[in-house]
Image (tube, grey):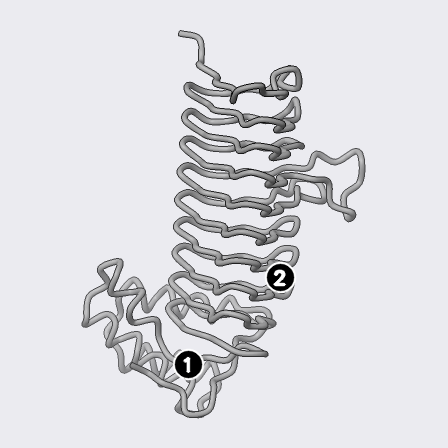
Amino acid sequence: MEATLTFSKECETEMLLTGVTYGENVEIGHGAVIGKNVIIGAGTKIGAYATIDGWTTIGNNCIIHPHVSIAAESHKNKHDVKSSVIIGDNTQVREFVTINGSSGRDQETRIGSHCLLSAYSHVDPNCSIGNHVVMSNAVHLAAHVEVEDRAVVGGLTMVHEFTRIGRNAMVGGASKVIQDVPPFIMVNGNPAKAFGINTIGMRRIGISENIRRTLKNAYKILYLSGLCYSRALEVMEQQLGLCEELEYFMAFLRGNKREICKVAHKAKTS
């Protein structure tokens, strides 16, 4: 069966769609500009005056709101390199968000499924955003930033290039993130500092009380014991009951390359 494509009334977009691949029930708003190498999944809606270029793939049932710019060529990119953006399913990109295409060979800018990128946010080339990530208004991710699954980044936050924000972490609004944020941790400030574990966020996704208590103790060992990383990891392994979440927490620390956010004074651990 031939895919269904719906245009808004008086739409000026149809003439621009030569070569575009699209699934069932795609909707295109008035004045949208879509490049010839774009793939749009079934049920996705593209808002008015959105611009989607490069080798972009958008998954199923996404909502791309008006005036969004996706895969505009980065100033870092060379003209003979494909500028790639991949967006998963059920992701919503709000008004005036800008997502740069990748730069460099075999690179891509990737955004997962079930994400929310709020208005005026910006994603630089070669960033990787996991699933169920929430970015509030006017968050700016510099190049090569990695945001892992279910992280929440507060509005007006700036994240330094090559920084990693761990799974289920929470970054407070108007923060300046220049060091890695470990999984399950809350950070805030300029520069961002650790304020305890993300208890509410973990509870919302069904992480048990016992595991939350284990991660709370891991936080205390890492930040409040005065031990170096290697010794803190040894103590975690010796004193805490291992679980998938704790093993992931320790693996993140072992793979850290930029140092992690320091602890705030009078840090809360509840």
Q: Is residue 252 left or right of residue 33?
A: left
Position above or below: 147 against 220: above
Residue at 45% across / 56% down in the picture?
A: 148
Name the one closer to the observer, 147 or 53. 53
State if disc 2 and disc 1 touch (CB < 8 Å): no
Q: Nearer the viewer, mark 1 or mark 2?
A: 1
Position above or below: 64 against 238: above
Position above or below: 250 against 83: below
Among the two numbered marks 1 and 2 on one chain, the one whose residue lies closer to the N terminus: 2
Distance of label 1 from label 2 (alpha carbons) = 22 Å
**Image location (x, y in percent) of residue 236:** 33, 79
Asked which quadrant contains residue 53, the reply is: top right
**Image location (x, y in percent) of residue 215:** 30, 74
Q: Is residue 160 left or right of residue 267?
A: right
Q: Is residue 208 left or right of residue 250?
A: left
Name the one closer to the observer, 246 or 11. 11
Residue type marked 2? Phe
Name the one closer to the observer, 61 or 31. 31
Residue at 61% across / 45% down in the picture?
A: 99
- The image's mark for residue 162 is 2
Residue type marked 1? Phe
Determine the secondary structure under disc 2.
loop
- The image's mark for residue 195 is 1
**Image location (x, y in percent) of residue 227:** 44, 89
Q: How many marks?
A: 2
Asked which quadrant contains residue 1, the reply is: top left
Asked which quadrant contains residue 52, the reply is: top right
- The image's mark for residue 264 is none
